Amino acid sequence: MSEIKRKRPKVTGDDRLPGDADRETMIERMIRVDHAGEFGAARIYKGQLAVLGKTPVGDTIRHMAKQEEAHLAAFEELLAERRVRPTMLSPIWHAAGFALGAATAAMSAKAAMACTVAVEDVIQDHYAEQSAKLGDDEAELRDLIDRFRAEEIEHKETGIAYKAEETPGYRVMSEFIKTGTRAAIWLSTRI
C-alpha cells in the first residue's frame, strides 16, 4: 500500500489542521486503538491455534502470536502509564477476534494465513500513518510503533509465503477482513 510521504513534525501535533484532535487526544486515541488492535490480533491467533495448533503451521502461528502478545503487553503498559482508558469495545473484539481466527483456520491453513495477510496489510498502513504524525517529542512511542510495524509486515510476508493468496475466494475474503479491520480501527479510536 501507500507509504506516508509527509515531512515529520518536530513536535507532535504541530501539523494539525482545524478540526483535528488536540495533541493529547491524538496520543490517547493512538494508544487506545493500538491496544485494541493488538488485543484483537492476539485473539485471532488464539482462535487459529485452537484449530491449527497441532498441525505443521502451528509453530509459525505460535511465533506470530508471541509477538502479538508482546505488542499487547507494551500497549497495556502505555495505557496505565499515560492513564488512557481502553476501548469499551474490548468484549466485542475478544469474541470477534477469536471467531475470525477459528473460522478462517477451520477453512484451511491457507485461509488462516489469508486472514493474517489481510489484517496486517491494513495494520502496516495504520502504523505508518501514526508514525508520520509523531514528532521527536514522542520518539519513544514512534520507535515502538515502527518496531511493531516491522513485525506486522513480517507476519504478512509469512502469510504470503504460506500461499495465503491461493485460498479459494481470496480476494473477497481479504476485502471483507480488511473492511472489518478498518471499521474496528475507526470504532476503537473513538469508543
Image (cartoon, rainbow, N blue to C red):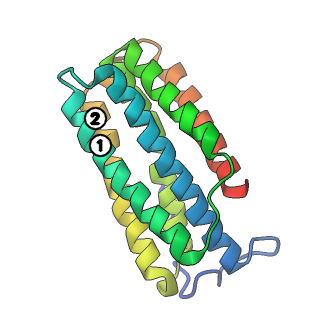
Given residues 179 and 24, the one toward you in this image is 24
Residue at 39% x, 65% y is 146
Residue 136, horizontal then vertical, whole percent: 47, 86
In this view of the protein, can residue 129 be seen by the observer? yes
Q: Quadrant of residue 52?
A: top left
Give the camera-side residue of 61 and 110.
Answer: 61
Q: Where's residue 149, x and y in %?
A: 39, 57
Residue 23: x, y in percent? 67, 79
Q: Is residue 4 left or right of residue 71?
A: right
Q: Mark 2 and mark 1: span between their CA atoms?
A: 5 Å
Left or right of 43, for residue 18: right
Where residue 117 sits, quadrant-wise, is: top left
What is the crowding at mark 1: few (fewer than 14 residues within 10 Å), some, or many (at least 20)?
A: some
Number of residues whose C-alpha sits closer than 10 Å to that of mark 2, classed few (under 14), some (14–19) or many (20 or more): many
Residue 110, horizontal then vertical, whole percent: 32, 20
Q: In the image, what residue type sits under mark 2? A: Ile
What residue lies at 50% left-to-right and 27% top-to-bottom?
100
- Tell me if residue 81 comes above or below residue 103 in the rendering: below
Taking the spot 38% from the left edge, 73% from the top edge, the residue there is: 143
Residue on which the image places disc 1: 64
Secondary element type, mark 1? helix
Please determine whether, in this image, residue 92 is positioned above or below residue 2.
Answer: above
Q: Are marks 2 and 1 in contact (CB under 8 Å)?
A: yes
Residue 6 visible in the picture:
no
Q: Which residue is mark 2?
A: 61
